[in-house]
Amino acid sequence: MERSFIETEDGSSSLYVPGLNEHYHSIHGAIQESLHIFIRAGIEFYGQKNISIIEAGFGTGLNAYLSLIHAETQNCTIHYTTLEKYPLSEKEIKVLNYPSLLPFKRPELFEVLHTSPWEEEVALTPRFTCLKHNTDFREWQPATKADIVFFDAFNPDVQPHLWTTEVFRRFYEALQPGGILVTYCVKGIVKQALRNAGFTLKRLPGPPGKREMLRATRPL
């Protein structure tokens, strides 16, 4: 997959895929978007001290890195499982500037996230364990139940096959009752697919540049 480097409006870097005309993050700010959708509306809303997360789309590793920082600074433990079909190259990883922009004392852990082996559970710190799967969402089978799903696939306009009822049902079954799925996308077809899979939905204010986002809950 051909990708090129961009800088978003908050100074944080991201990637652009010319073949899909798609960005990995909001051009208004990669870090502020991820903090808003996945950390604040996801982890902080859930509010537990021992959390299991499944991420659909490892991408640049930003959501995982922010989750690691949250675990280290907020006295909680996170088990993080992430799914990615097209991992970044070493050259692409080196242009990402998140560690230099975030006030965290162990910036080297961002590179460790990317260089740790796939298909192997790795304790990056005593509070953060990561398991990376190099796979398609549609082929992955969850082994355990999670508390939160970060759904961060490319826009359904360019990858509609990843936003179907069948895909969301897979993640519904991977969640504990009361577990949540958070995503940036609020398109009608996405909301209907989530409802068809069994979720109840709540629209929330979006990050800068986006009016709304979604939080979906698996009922108790």
Image: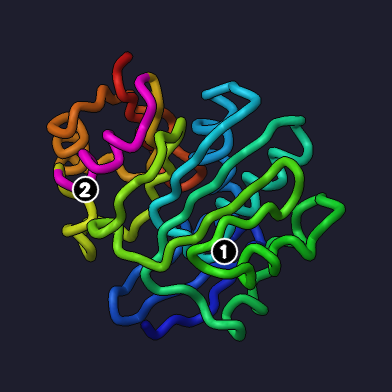
- Which residue in the structure is indicated by mark 2? 167
Quarter where residue 114 is shown:
bottom right
The number of numbered badges drawn on the structure is: 2
Residue reaching furthest to the top:
220
- Which residue in the structure is indicated by mark 1? 8
x 35%, y 65%: residue: 135
- The quarter in which the N terminus is drawn is bottom left
Is 65 placed left or right of 16 in the picture?
right
x 56%, y 51%: residue: 63
Tell me where the magenta segment starts and ends, as one range. Answer: 166-177
Is 61 placed left or right of 182 in the picture?
right
Mark 1 crowdedness (10 Å alpha carbons): few <14, some 14-19, many ≥20: some
Is 4 placed left or right of 188 in the picture?
right
The kind of secondary structure element at disc 2 is helix
Residue 164 among those drawn in magenta: no
Q: Is residue 155 above or below residue 164?
A: below
x 44%, y 49%: residue: 55
